[in-house]
Image (cartoon, rainbow, N blue to C red):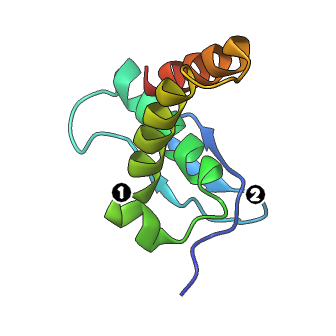
Amino acid sequence: MKHSPEPWFCDGLIIKAKGRGQPIGTTEPSSGSPDAGDYENAKRIAACVNACEQLPPEFLRRGVVRDLVALCERMLREMKTLPVSPSFVEEALDILSTARG
């Protein structure tokens, strides 16, 4: 069975898919009041699903995206020694470091 199509979005703590009437899920705590982290979790789930739209779930389970990012970082560091525009390499490394947080 295929998951609900993208894009996914948040309505508070509720995670929904465009065109789907029923919510997909919620980050509402089972007890107590929600806090800012619960809202951020909902946003993160929707953002991750949308960012991985074309990737098979097996890639995600096996860590392929994480491994590709690490490989790109290593390749870009090695490229600094080649006749490549240093600004290109620096820009790519900045993008990857921003993505890593």
Return the x and y of residue 83 as percentages of the image width and height: 69, 23
What residue is rendered at 45% in x and 66% in y? 59
Say which mark, if any, is on residue 63. Answer: 1
Q: Nearer the viewer, residue 96 or 89?
A: 89
Residue 13 in percent (x, y) is at: 49, 38
Identify the image quadrant of the C terminus. top left
- Look at 44% across and 43% down and name the residue there: 71
Look at label 1 and name its amino acid.
Gly
The vertical placement of 10 against 79, above or below, is below
Extreme right residue here? 19
Q: Amino acid at mark 2?
A: Lys
Identify the residue at horizontal 67%, vertical 13% (top origin).
86
Q: Quadrant of residue 38?
A: top left
Quadrant location of residue 18? bottom right
**55 to the left or right of 29:** right
- Frontmost residue, 14 versus 97: 97
Residue 73's x, y, as percent?
A: 47, 32
Q: Which residue is mark 2?
A: 18
The label nearer to you, 1 versus 2, is 1
Residue closest to the far bottom: 1
Q: Looking at the image, do the residues carrying marks 1 and 2 touch, with CB atoms under 8 Å apart? A: no
